[in-house]
Image (cartoon, rainbow, N blue to C red):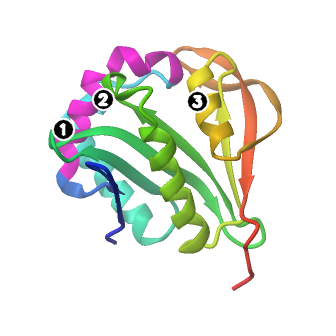
């Protein structure tokens, strides 16, 4: 499956099995930057060998429309600078999934993540015919809150001790965006 979008000198595309080295490099570069917002990761998560195994699974999930893992690439620098992932995709009668994302510490504050999530949501709504996309964020993650608000996500509630992040149970704000143009297939 080949899905790709471009804006300025950035490309947003589905991850490929050949991306093991560049995605491992991305997570190594941003290990400390992302740690407060993500689960604790095994050593393999930061190695090309670990990603080779993970990519086999992701490519299979793509084939079956069960999950989609996008990377954001700086075409000038030839490196991955972010991720946008859609997981827990459920079809009839829910037609929904969850979105998560991360961005390189050096690229923060430039609107890149907002644009990357926006183009992938548009694809999820049109090509995958999802009705609802959900996102959850830790209340102190103001940057994530701003990205979601700018994209039209609506707060639906707060979940206490929702996800085990960086070694502790963290409360999360629950949000969603609805596809007002959704039609049954």
How far apart are the two marked residues, 2 and 1, measured between alpha carbons?
A: 10 Å
161 to the left or right of 107: right
User: Which of these two is toward me, 117 or 59?
Assistant: 117
| Furthest residue in direction front, as rendered | 8
**Circle 1 sits on which residue?**
48
> Would residue 50 be found to the left or right of residue 160 on screen?
left
SS for callout 1: helix
Spatial CA span between label 3 and label 2: 18 Å
10 Å neighbourhood of mark 1: few (<14), some, or many (≥20)? Answer: some
Q: Earlier in the sequence, mark 3 or mark 2?
A: 2
Q: Is residue 85 left or right of residue 97?
A: left
Residue at 53% across, 74% down? 127
Residue range of the region highlighted in magenta in the rendering: 19-37
**Label 3 – label 1 distance at C-alpha:** 28 Å
Question: Which residue has dot 3 on it?
Answer: 144
Specify few, some or many for label 2: CA neighbours under 10 Å numbering under 14, 14-19, or 20 or more: many
Secondary-structure class at tag 3? helix
Provide residue 129's location: percent of width, then percent of height.
Answer: 63, 73
Does the stretch in magenta take in 39? no
Task: Point out which mark residue 81 bears.
Answer: none
Residue on which disc 2 sits: 27
């Amino acid at each position: 499956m080949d899905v790709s979008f471009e804006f300025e000198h950035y490309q947003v595309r589905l991850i490929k099995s050949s991306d093991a080295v560049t995605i491992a490099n991305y997570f190594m570069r941003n290990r400390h930057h992302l740690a407060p917002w993500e689960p604790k990761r095994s050593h393999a998560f930061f190695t090309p060998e670990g990603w080779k195994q993970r990519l086999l699974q992701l490519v299979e999930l793509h084939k079956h429309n069960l999950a989609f893992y996008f990377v954001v690439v700086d075409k000038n620098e030839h490196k991955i600078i972010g991720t946008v992932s859609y997981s827990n995709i459920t079809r009839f009668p829910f037609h929904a999934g969850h979105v998560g994302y991360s961005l390189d510490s050096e690229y923060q504050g430039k609107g890149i993540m907002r644009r990357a999530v926006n183009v992938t949501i548009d694809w999820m709504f049109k090509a995958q015919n999802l009705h609802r996309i959900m996102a959850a964020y830790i209340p102190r993650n103001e940057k994530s809150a701003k990205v979601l608000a700018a994209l039209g996500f609506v707060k639906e509630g707060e979940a206490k001790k929702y996800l085990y992040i960086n070694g502790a149970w963290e409360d999360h704000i629950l949000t969603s965006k609805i596809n007002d143009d959704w039609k049954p297939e």
